[in-house]
Image (tube, rainbow, N blue to C red):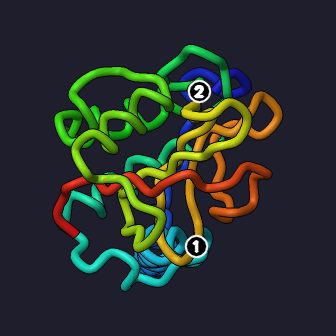
Amino acid sequence: MPYAVPNAPTAPLRPTLRRDRVPRLGLALIALTTVLAVTGLEAPAVAFGRSNSAVSASGSQAARVLRIAEAHIGAGFRMGTEGHRYFDCSGFVYRVYEMAGLLGRIGGSRKGATAYYHWFRNRGLASRSNPHPGDLIAYGGGKPGRVPHIAIYIGNGRAISALNPRLGVRVHRVNGIGLPVKAYLHVQISR
């Protein structure tokens, strides 16, 4: 202490009683941990407009794809990129499936939206109905045979994709982006 007199007697220090603070702090930490755990488990289902039953098994390949896709919500859009901070629509699909270890299920390499569509169509895996979570959505419009946009179906009429520079990666209604659905591309994964 800078103001103490050298060699002066000092009063013994009394121990600070912190016993009453420890249980309160412990309870506060337990409460905080519980809130974070519940929020982390429930928020994605509520925030993305689907119930926990949209994907039948939480350990399924489809559930893994959706968890990875949802983790990228809010990332930016940049044409020709495939993550981690910026994506274009086909780069987003590529990165999600690559991170899920399922790249072979969508053709094994980075493709554009039109090439993904043709890969699935040539294998009889494209249809106009019955999408399942984890399937891809090819959007049409413009030139015949061209697919200007691709998204990942998450269930209950909703999809996730890298939309444009203003919106980036977002959840949206399947029919809510101003382009018609050309086909659902049925990815052969467990659900």
* Image point (28%, 61%), residue name: 62
Compute the Cα span from label 2 to label 1: 22 Å
The x, y position of residue 133, in whole percent, is: 38, 66
Quadrant occupied by the N terminus: top right
The x, y position of residue 84, in whole percent, is: 48, 25
Q: Which mark is residue 157?
A: 1
Three-letter residue code for mark 1 = Gly
Q: Tag 1 or tag 2, which sits nearer the N-term?
A: 2
* Image point (59%, 24%), residue name: 86
Q: Secondary structure at mark 1?
A: loop
Three-letter residue code for mark 2 = Asp
The answer to whether 67 is drawn above or below residue 173 in the figure is above
Disc tally is 2
Work out whether residue 167 or residue 8 is closer to the camera in this orientation and state it.
167
The x, y position of residue 178, in whole percent, is: 79, 51
Disc 2 designates what residue?
88
Residue 71 visible here? yes
Work out whether residue 120 or residue 86 is closer to the camera in this orientation and state it.
120
* Image point (61%, 38%), residue name: 149
